Image (cartoon, helix red, strand yellow):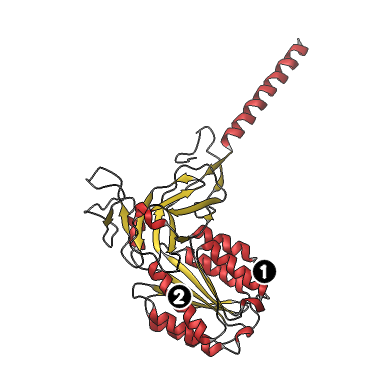
Amino acid sequence: MAKQSSLLLLALVAVLSVSFGQATAQETETKIRVEVNMVQLNVAVMDGKGNYVTGLRPSDFVVTEDAIPQKVATFAEGNEPTRKVTASGPNGDKPGELRVRGQNGSADGDESSELGSELGSMMAGANVFILFDTSNYMYRGFVFAQDAIAEFVRSLDGPDRVAFYSYSRDLSRATTLTADRSQVLHGVRTTVAGDDAALYNALLMTVRDAGQNTGRKVIVVFSNGPDNFSMVPPEDVAELAQSKGIPIYMISTREAKLEPVSSTVFKRMSAATGGEAYFAKTWKQQQKAFASIRNDLAHLYSLSYYPQANPNTGWRAITVKLVGDRARGCRVRTRNGYRPQSARVSAETVVPPSGLGPTPGSSN
């Protein structure tokens, strides 16, 4: 009898242990949540002679992400207002037509549009972050570099906001984003030459700052080339800029052949993000480079889309092509992809109260 009681007790303990283990597994579960926001692209289109192609419409562009066709949601050319690209039918619009939206992002009195908040911020012009090399590499041409940057700041269109940063070993945020050109110019004129160069450290922090802003944003780097103090590899900076949709324009005061390592990095980084690299040794060449960047900003097409269902939580390749007669001989420049960091691909451990089941509001 005692033996039977012992066996029954052991069986009960085993059942309770299994039940407890199952309950613990159910109560503590890892959930992967993936949310992808609107993806914005800055697209430059050049003809065979290097001239900007203007007057294109949304229907002239084909956008794919991991070979999945995407629907363009908003569209703008240069500094014109951002517009919603209509779908076919509901309001009598033809597919691909543009509807101008007000400053609050609404169209035809529709205040509840899902595009409202994004468009409202995208109407305000570009956010331009200027990063200036004040390391000891810049001693000889320091004043001329300041002059070139100051002229670039004055030449930017009114709606654009500008931030001016400088770096040597550390990053100095001389002027945060502002539409007041006098503040930016004061920041430029008060910089002083410093110590070793930590370009990629500073550029990474600049990308992070720029990424906190919605709408169009670009980074313009004025550098003498070498980096002898950074702890961050340039590949990490480029990938973050790609993921944030921030073109990086690089202006180096050294000839490419004199600094082949830095020159290669600059070219790759600018190409990957949709920007350009310039090698301008003289003051006049530097002015010309800044003028080219200003011209580029004035002719960029801004496209955005909400990604179609895509199970890929890693690197996503983006391609933008032109269709139709005007596509012949044209070259398209934009970022080549992104990793959905801004989408917050996160693993969360959910531990609900005992006996209450999953925590209310939790989602996959």
Nearer to me, 10 or 35: 35
For image coordinates 61% across by 82% down, the residue present is: 135
Q: Is residue 346 left or right of residue 159?
A: right
Nearer to me, 181 or 253: 253
Q: Quadrant of the N terminus?
A: top right
Depth check, mark 1 against mark 2: the one in front is: 2
Residue 43, image quadrant:
bottom left
The mark that comes first in sequence, 1 or 2, is 1
User: How far separated are the C-alphas under marks 1 and 2?
Assistant: 31 Å
**Residue 160 location, x and y as percent?**
37, 72
Q: Is residue 63 above or below residue 103?
A: above
Q: Which residue is mark 2?
A: 292
Determine if residue 36 is in view: no
Instruction: Check disc 1 and give the amino acid type.
Output: Met
Instruction: Check disc 2 and give the amino acid type.
Output: Ser
Q: Is residue 186 above or below residue 237?
A: below
Hey, which residue is sitting farthest top in the picture? 1
For image coordinates 59% across by 86% down, the residue present is: 193
**Residue 90 location, x and y as percent?**
25, 43
Hey, which residue is sitting farthest right in the picture? 3
For image coordinates 45% across by 60% down, the residue present is: 329
Q: Which residue is mark 1?
A: 231
Residue 194, image quadrant:
bottom right
Circle 1 SS class: loop
Label 1 crowding class (10 Å Cα cut-off): few <14, some 14-19, many 20+?
few
Label 2 crowding class (10 Å Cα cut-off): few <14, some 14-19, many 20+?
some
**Residue 301 location, x and y as percent?**
39, 62
**Residue 338 location, x and y as percent?**
53, 55
User: How many labels were placed on the picture?
Assistant: 2
Determine if residue 288 is in view: yes
